[in-house]
Image: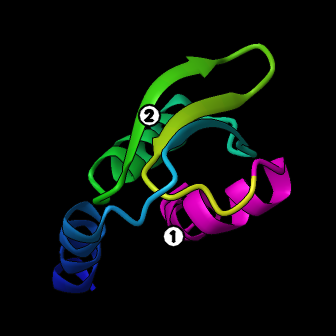
Amino acid sequence: FEVQAHSDVVKRIFTMKFKPGIVRVPYKLKSDFGVISVANSITNTPGTVVVDMDEKRRYYYVHWINVISPKEEVCHENISAGFEKYIRRFL
């Protein structure tokens, strides 16, 4: 998966086929460990970087190299839902 993600970013850069933007991604975790672990996982994924967090409203603000939709549900499903699923196993 890691090689595939890096290859996708490189391909997008060379072909100039990307649609960058900052999206708001809701999160459902409550523990500080979980929230920070997911934020770090998002940042370590090629093509995404957490640039800010709103802890009161429970959002990450993520720079995404290829925004497929600005809708929060779509962003959550494509960016953070998988990480949250795995982090819940440790909590």
Bounds of the magenta span? 70-91
Q: Tell me how far mark 2 sits from mark 1, CA to CA.
A: 18 Å
Residue located at (57% from left, 71% from top): 82
Q: Nearer the viewer, residue 85 or 26?
A: 26
Residue 16 picture location, percent across and down: 32, 61
Q: Which residue is mark 2?
A: 50
Residue 55 picture location, percent across and down: 67, 17
Q: Is residue 51 left or right of residue 55?
A: left
Label 2 sits on a secondary structure element that is strand
In this view, the mark in front (2 or 1):
2
Q: Which residue is mark 1?
A: 86
Q: Within 10 Å of the Cα at label 2, are there few (<14), some (14-19), or many (20+) other Cα atoms? A: many
The residue type indicated by label 1 comes to Tyr
Residue located at (28% from left, 86% from top): 1
Q: Nearer the viewer, residue 78 or 27?
A: 78
Label 1 sits on a secondary structure element that is helix
Q: In the rendered structure, does residue 90 fall within the stretch colored magenta? A: yes
First of labels 2, 1 by sequence position: 2
Rendering quarter of residue 81: bottom right
Residue located at (44% from left, 34% from top): 50
Q: Is residue 2 left or right of residue 41?
A: left
Q: Within 10 Å of the Cα at label 1, are there few (<14), some (14-19), or many (20+) other Cα atoms? A: few
Instruction: Give the quarter of the figure containing the C terminus.
Output: bottom right
Residue 74 picture location, percent across and down: 77, 62
Residue located at (16% from left, 82% from top): 3
Q: In the rendered structure, does residue 46 fall within the stretch colored magenta? A: no
Question: Label for residue 67?
Answer: none
